[in-house]
Amino acid sequence: MAYNTNITPGNPPLLWDKFKSALDEVNANFVTIGATLAGGEQKTITNTTQASPVVVTTSTAHGLTDGQRVTITDVVGMTQLNGNTYYADVLTSNTFALYTDAGISSAVNGTGFTAYASGGKTQGLNEFSTLNLEALTTSVKPADDAQKVLGDATHKWKEVHVAETLATAGNEDNGLYLGTAHVKGESGKVDLPFGSTINGDLIIDPEKRYFRYINLDDGDIVEADHTNDTLSFYGGTGVQLVAGSDADSITFINDGVTQAIASTGITVSSATGNVTFTNTGVTSAQNTTNIPGRATGRTPGEGVTVSSTTGAVQFTNTGVLEVQQGFGITVSTDPATGVVTVSNGAPAVPTFQQIAVDGQTSLAADSTADILTFEPGYGIGITLDSPNDKITIAVDSKIDITGSVFADDSGLLVDGVEGKIVGAVDTTSLRTSESKIALGSSAGETNQGSDAIAIGEQAGQTNQGEDAVAIGDEAGQNNQGANAIAIGYQAGEENQVSNAIAIGNQAGETTQGSAAIAIGYRAGELTQLGGSVAIGYQAGYNSQAEEAVAIGHQAGETNQAASSIAIGDEAGQSGQGGNAIAIGERAGHLNQHANTIVINAQTETELNTTQTGEFIVKPVRNAVGTTMLMYNATTGEVSYTGSPVTDIKGSVFGDDSTLLIDAVSSTIPAAVLNGTATIDIRGSVFGDDSSVVIDGATGTVTGKIAPNSAAPGSETEAAEVGEIRVDDSYVYVRKSTGWGRIAIGGWV
């Protein structure tokens, strides 16, 4: 481990950037310690399998042992492994399987995990990886003074917590020591040592004195917010402030009233200082003259008020200010007496005293100033034409029609404002002038194509194509293509392409491709591509590829590849490969390989492939017959024959190229026949087509044994138990404890 052994925050005064750098270096040391204690070196992952258990492959030797704990991080694709700790079952130097227990008995099942894409790190852990620094009960300090670093610029501690300094015994030295400087935390505040500086300047100069408070004569107090706070003086009205040239003095100058001088009606007590002004002029204001002429008997000053008898006096006319003439009225004034005469200057004209309303009480004016008001009733509009003195009363065309139109005297039937029928419609024929049909709240609301049909709330709501059909709540709601059909709740809801068919609750719900067919609850629900067929509960449910066929309950349910076929309950249910065929319950149930055929007639039993190109059938009846099933690898034809003419090759002798039975010459050319047979072998092995050589039912050899094998080299030579060899002197038999032999005597 490499540590930085030279960590220092610098000499006082403490600067933050140096202190931060020191903490960064301390942090880097702890990272190095953690990596060393955790275990081995991190290894790069190149693959993880979707199997049980999950098998991990590393780019270089992983160096793990069986049962060792490992961590997995940074995997792209199979992210379910990230951040977890497992136990390793070592398979090879570059591969290991994942388990959840040290006994390697509970495998990590990755069959349902996302497929591996790239990247990833793994690291073996040792007994120190569980080291918990929070459990420390002793002090931690470096072995060398002023040599070790805590953190660095790229490995920082998020928080550093130091106990508060208290006056109690044992807590006086709590805090942070920077060299000999003791930084204390007291009651939520930081106490720095005496003489501490900021950028080289003392925080407080003990040789200077400051006023913290300034009291004003009205009792207000000005308080400094901090040691660098500024007290500002401003000149008010009549006061000028002049600072001395050395900025150490302020002169207050009165530049307003400097002297008071008496004048007419006003006396002053003094020219300067405290001055009293006295009104020696008018002391009272009253109106004592009667109104002239016919005003005899009126109170003097009537119609005039005075605001004050002394000082500033305001006179107000509280009587009539002016009389103006109006229509049919003349006004004249006698200047000598002030009398105003008001006369009716227009002749009387006929008027209606009352207004009668048919069948109702007549209207009569309450006074000459009364007003007759016209108000519009339901379905009536009133328009006033003032220049032409005309009132127009007309029927409002935008009204709701209620009544007995449909035998309902009180219900709202036609909404004239909204332009729609809201009452029940009971008829044997309903025709519209439109070629398209939209029935339901927001159905076919925006850009509905010609001859399209949208029935149900929000069915075909936006951009429904020509000749498209959407029936059901939110069916074909957005961007349904031309000639597409969506029937059922949310069927073909989003981006159903032209000529697609979706029938059933949420069938073909999102991005159903052109000419695709989805029938059944959630069939082809998510991203069903063009030309594919999904029939049945959740058949082709998610990501069914082009021209794939899924028929049956959950058939081809997830990630069915192009041109594949899945028929039956859960057939090809997850990850069926391209051009694969699965027929029967759970046939090719999980990750069926491409270009394979699986036919399964078993009950509730999965039948899966192991590699590409397989043809798997279960069950097949075990019965003795006279014919053999044949397969033509060139034409792909399956046939049978009772007389096969072919050589049989295989690994009976551990050699895949050894000719075992020569069908042309009717011989067995092999020198040694090892293994366990469970059938009878008949034929020309010994030139007798009818002799039983090996009885598979009883496990006995009934014919002659004349092998030409070499004698064992020693008693311990490796061989299968029960193997028999013969030479000119002995018969050799391999026992469980080693070879035994029996001498062969002469003819007796």
Image (cartoon, rainbow, N blue to C red):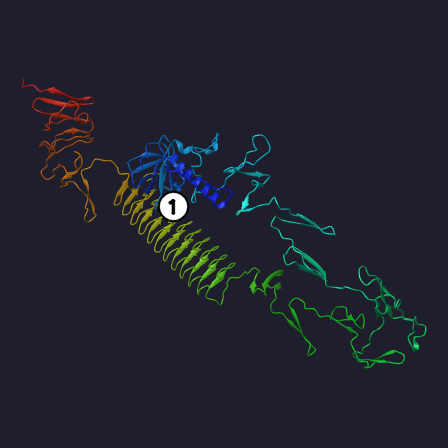
Picture coordinates of residue 629 (x, y %)?
20, 41
Residue 17 visible? The answer is yes
Percent across and percent down for residue 81 are 38, 41
* Residue name at image x 38 percent, y 35 percent: 36
Quadrant in which the C terminus appears = top left
Q: Is residue 407 visible?
A: no
In the image, residue 457 sits, relative to residue 599, either above or below, namely below
Q: Which one is nearer the viewer's eye here, 488 or 180?
A: 180
Who is closer to the viewer here, 120 or 601? Answer: 120
Q: Is residue 533 above or below residue 143?
A: below
In this view, the residue in front, 611 or 17, is: 17
Number of residue marks = 1
Q: Which residue is mark 1?
A: 554
Residue positioned most to the right: 297
Q: Position of residue 268 (x, y in %)?
A: 84, 64
* Quarter in which the N terminus is drawn: top left
Q: Secondary structure at mark 1?
A: loop
> How far across and how far down the image is residue 182, in percent?
54, 37
In the picture shown, does residue 123 fall above or below 484? above
State the residue in front, 199 or 41: 199
Residue 277 figure quarter: bottom right
Label 1 environment density (alpha carbons within 10 Å; few <14, some 14–19, many ≥20): many
Q: Is residue 429 left or right of residue 685?
A: right
Residue at position x 50%, y 63% in the image: 430
User: What is the residue that sits farthest to the front in this orientation?
Assistant: 246
Q: Amino acid at mark 1?
A: Gln
Residue 493 left/right relative to 344: left
In the picture as drawn, the residue positioned furthest to the left comes out as 747
